[in-house]
Image (spheres, rainbow, N blue to C red):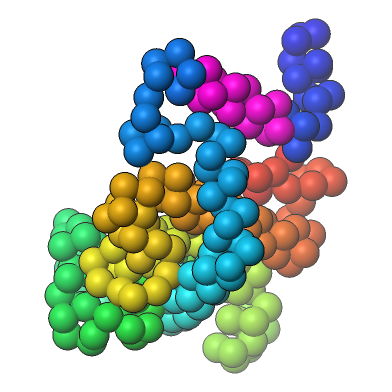
Amino acid sequence: MASKRQARSIPAGLLALLVGLVTLLIWEALVQLAGLPAFILPAPGAVWARALVAIADGSLLRHVLVTLQEVLLGLALGAVAAGLLGYGLARSPRWERLLAPFVVASQSVPIVALAPLLVIWFGPGLLSKTLICALIVFFPILINTILGLHSVPQDLRDLMRSLQASRAQTLRLLELPAALPVFLAGLRIGATLSVIGAVVGELVGADRGLGFLINVGRGQYDTALVFVAVFALVGLALALYGLVVLAERRWLWWQQKSNSLSLFSGEK
């Protein structure tokens, strides 16, 4: 009990900082003790120095903005499409039973197999990367939307019918508030997956973006640059995830069982 209380008393940000510092120390020790060359595993200091160079010449920001644009457009497209289709399927059990096998079967094809085709069909520009991001976020948001709408108690639906509420009123006053927590949980997953989709598309074919930067570093044996791009991707994914969590805290205040929402479960 005492150890649990002590763990809870440590702020999450401080704990994450300590874990990061320990990881960097282990990384530095591994490089020094093993005598690894920089093109195999650069030291943290070398990665930091390379990041400063990329920041100074503006290349890092330029590629980050390209990837961010692809991610935001793909996430928005995938979320809207999944939300609309999920609502339609939840309202029509017959169509849900009919299309469910095809939706599930579509997930058996990895995105890395579809990415080259999309790049060939739509070119190496923004459109293909947006579609890749949309496809990779579509499934989890779709499933969560359907589950959220199915979670609405039948007695509440009967109550809305007894009050002669229109379909729009039922959607606004009952279905959206009930499905929003589960939808946002799917959006949290989609926010991180969208970054994966963007970088997969850029690795397949692009002349800009963080995936392109990884290809450049790999081709030049500039492993430090690869690490810079990877850390930028991690930061991008964490930022998007954090924005969704903040949206949950703002929009789901009525659902909170306590004072705050946690990072993963949406509760304290």
Residue visible at 54% across and 24% down in the picture: 28
Extent of the magenta region? 16-30
Name the quadrant containing residue 52.
bottom right
Between 233 and 266, the residue placed more toward the observer is 233
Residue visible at 48% across and 18% down in the picture: 32
Q: Position of residue 235 (x, y in %)?
A: 58, 53
Image: 222 above or below 87? above
Residue 156 included in the magenta stretch of the image? no
Helix, strand or loop: magenta stretch: helix
Is residue 16 in view? yes
Is residue 156 in view? no
Image: 74 above or below 18? below
Q: Is residue 4 left or right of residue 221?
A: right
Image: 2 above or below 249? above
Residue 18 included in the magenta stretch of the image? yes
Name the quadrant containing residue 5.
top right
Q: Position of residue 51 (x, y in %)?
A: 57, 52
Between 65 and 41, the residue placed more toward the observer is 41
Name the quadrant containing residue 173.
bottom right
